[in-house]
Amino acid sequence: MSLMKVFGSFLAAFEFHRFYREIYRPIENQKKIKKTIIANFKGTQYAQDIEFKDNWQDIPLVDYEAIRPYINDISLGKPNILTRNKIIYFAKTSGTISGVKYIPLSKVTLLNQIKFIRAQLFIYLYKTKKYAILNQKMLFLQGSPKLDVYNKVKYGRLSGIVYHFVPSWLISNRHPSYEVNIIEDWSQKVLAIINSLGQRKLSVIGGIPPWVLGFLEKLQHTTNPFIKEISLYIHGGVSISPFYERLRKFLPNTDFLDTYAASEGLFGLSLEPNEATLTLISHSDIYYEFIEFSKPNAPIIDLRDIKTQVVYEIIISNMSGLYRYRIGDLVE
């Protein structure tokens, strides 16, 4: 067994046991996170503006427009605006209502997102024993890692920001290179990725379904033989449903792992290959609340009171300055 396989098997066992130890105590996890978030919230400009004392219910439900002025203050380098944690990046995203958004990211939030994606990969390896994956190329289709600056804070697509936090043990097998990744034109970028791959075998591919589908459609016209040998596809960002059948034609034997990820946080993971359900991550830096979607004026509840087969609007609070924030998603 190679050194990488030995390392991988050890880390996979560690990640598996650590993750499963935590997910079976979600209420306890959420109580701790809420307490930590409140401590981080106190003393901020926002807390002063709403005259926050200790009552969580005094924090209003908000959308992005409500915190936009605070985001501008953060961009100017002002401390303790929404959070006492330093905001090191903005994840730039767009919505149908608020237009361009700059979602604040502290180091705590960013590293948690990376931590749980890593955990998902190693849990998969622990269950399938496919440790050879670690010695093969991994391709991640993502936004450009070349970042811009909003006043004094760097910003970019979340996937482009994450590029700068890839662990050292993965760098040699990561693809594409920085030079290829910063190509702005998507068609040219895809062609450059294909050309740089040559005849190398890929073990893992990651990216949102429309990007991966477009890449695979281009790849089928090349002489690279590895397209049907990809072991694992990690996807998220948008629903895979409209793309699933076409993706399966290209990847008939590939395991699919889903993630429920947004610029505001990583909320859930699939822990079994090809399963449709996601496991909520209760032990990150996110506190969850819910409103039953079908009932006007329904009370705001937390994990203790949710029921199965009910559709809820999800509300999140985190360590990057989002408090009782409506991300606009529905979950069941």
Image (cartoon, rainbow, N blue to C red):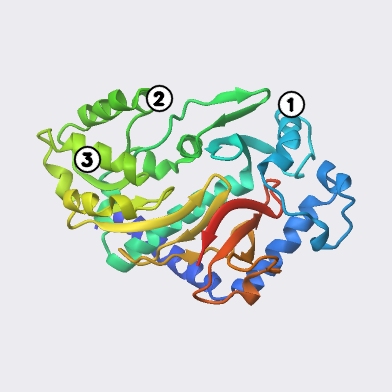
Q: Position of residue 106 (x, y in %)?
A: 64, 42
Q: CA distance from mark 1 to mark 2?
A: 26 Å
In-front residue for pair 324/130: 324
The foreground one among 40 and 291 is 291
Image quadrant where residue 137 sits: top left
| Residue 110, horizontal then vertical, whole percent | 57, 45
Discs 2, 3 touching: Cβ within 8 Å: no
Helix, strand or loop status at disc 2: loop
Residue at 66% from the left image edge and 69% from the top image edge: 302
Position above or below: 248 against 270: above
Q: Which residue is mark 3?
A: 216
Which sits earlier in the primary sequence, circle 2 or circle 3?
2
Q: Residue at x 36, y 44 (%)?
A: 207
Amino acid found under the numbered disc labelled 2: Ile
Residue, disc 1: 76
Q: CA distance from mark 2 to mark 3?
A: 20 Å
127 w.r.t. 261: above or below: below
Give the labeled residue for mark 2. Answer: 182
Above or below, 250 against 218 in this view is below
Q: Nearer the viewer, mark 2 or mark 3?
A: 3
- In percent of width and height, residue 243 lies at 29, 50
**Above or below, comparing residue 264 to residue 7 in the picture:** above
Question: Which element type, helix, strand or loop, lies under badge 3?
Answer: helix
Q: Residue at x 52, y 50 (%)?
A: 113
The x and y percentages for residue 248 are 21, 54
Marks 1 and 3, Cα distance to the nearest angstrom?
42 Å
